[in-house]
Amino acid sequence: MSTITAQVKMKDANWWKRLQIWQKVLIGLILGAATGFLLGEDAAILHPIGKAFIAAIKMLVVPLIFISLVCGVTAIKDVTRMGRIGIKTFVAYIVTTAIAIPIGLALAVWLEPGVGMELGSATAIDVKSAPSIVDTLLNIIPTNPFASFANGDVLQIILFAIFLGIAINLVGEKADPVRKVFDAFADVMYKLTDLVIAFAPYGVFALIATTTGQYGLDVLLPLGKVILGVYLGCIIHAIVTLGGGLALLARLNPIQFFKGIFEAQLVAFSTTTAAGTLPVTMACARDNLGVSKDVSSFVLPVGTTINLDGTALYQALTAVFIAQAYGIDLGMAEYGMILLTAVLASIGTASVPGGGLIVLSLVLSSVGLPLEGIALVAGIDRILDMARTTINVTGDAAVSVLIAHSEGELDKEIYYKRPV
């Protein structure tokens, strides 16, 4: 009897180890929120833990994007096939982003978050000037790849990785040793990613506790309609656009998709960085959704730069909110300009420091809205960023599934391995 009792106790003691990583992250998120509400601003003592997790996950971003893209390109030796996948990827990302914007506009018109708002004196914002289209295109070309790595210039890293992968393919058999080195390096990076992600539940706990303790309800209530609009819009876009797209175009059960990507969503929600969540997104796409290594290694790193569904939705809703707050009426022409500017600016400034602020300033400027309005949402930007980053990551994963399905590289046994 004593032996059985000892075994039961040992089994109970190992319950945490038996949980899947997404379950651990979810527990960390819930406990973190509760801890933040209880401790208030004192929860800031946990900030170093969250900061350490963010630093560790950012450590992976640049090498993972570079290595994954090189391996993805070298795996697609057929130049025609690579071009086809590239075009599909770009079109899919643009379409999903363009669909997200009207959702944000419609919710802003319906909820009227800024109507009757007493602004008082708005605080001026020092907005960086946005680069021109020509400068943006020229800046994509890395004059010094090593500087691009050091500065974290994602667009330049992506272009260099694609060119390097193409060059390896063109060299042929002589470049096989180089190809094998990159493949081995990729496996090492994936293992390092597993080690860092094992720390995710504790990092998420600290990040959510700090955020909840800092903002509490005092900031959430006055701008509750804006928060409600962004979160509701993100949910609608995820279910209707992304889930519906998988059901209609690929005949896949969207519930399986959301179960498979849930872990990446939790990390994105707590860290508010799509690039930092990339390691988890790639792991979920391969291991939970059945996306081939070739497709995931190409589509997902590109998506972290040019696919900003949640951000575009946020920009549209926020622009209308600011217009309402200042009593400025917008017509169909202005709504159309918001849509066009949000799509183009999101792509052009994705990797520019302070890109979110630049995109919002461009959207406001395109329809003559006061840039001072940015100050209205600055206080809750972290709360909004959690939702829009989650949708950005979800959109990346959904497109990777669609591309893999269209190329016959989606393992449906893996996709459906989890019971609904």
Image: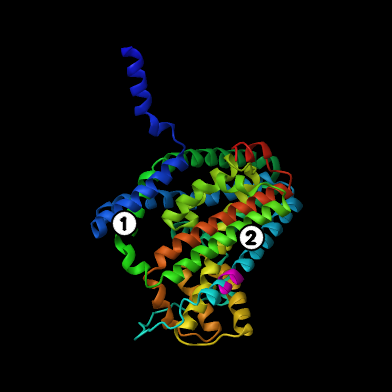
* Position of residue 354 in the picture relative to residue 70 (left or right): left
- The span from disc 1 to disc 2 (Cα, nearest Å) is 33 Å
Q: Quickly name the residue at label 2.
A: 241
Question: What residue range appears in magenta?
Answer: 101-106
Please name the amino acid that badge 2 sits on.
Answer: Thr
* Mark 1 neighbour density, 10 Å: few (under 14) some (14–19) many (20 or more): many
Q: In the image, what residue occupies the spot 48% across and 60% down?
A: 387
Q: Position of residue 233 (x, y in %)?
A: 54, 65
Residue 52 visible in this rendered orientation of the protein: no
Quarter of the image with the N terminus is top left
Q: Mark 1 falls on what kind of element?
A: helix
Q: Earlier in the sequence, mark 1 or mark 2?
A: 1
Marker disc for residue 210: 1
Q: In the image, what residue occupies the spot 53% across and 51% down?
A: 65
* Mark 2 neighbour density, 10 Å: few (under 14) some (14–19) many (20 or more): many
* Position of residue 211 in the picture relative to residue 263 (left or right): left
Residue 394 highlighted magenta (yes or no) = no
Q: In the image, what residue occupies the spot 41% across and 63% down?
A: 383
Q: Position of residue 240 (x, y in %)?
A: 63, 59
Q: Nearer the viewer, residue 183 or 4?
A: 4
Answer with the quarter of the image where residue 2 lies.
top left
Residue 227 visible in this rendered orientation of the protein: yes
Q: In the image, what residue occupies the spot 64% across and 60% down?
A: 241
Q: Nearer the viewer, residue 64 or 23?
A: 23
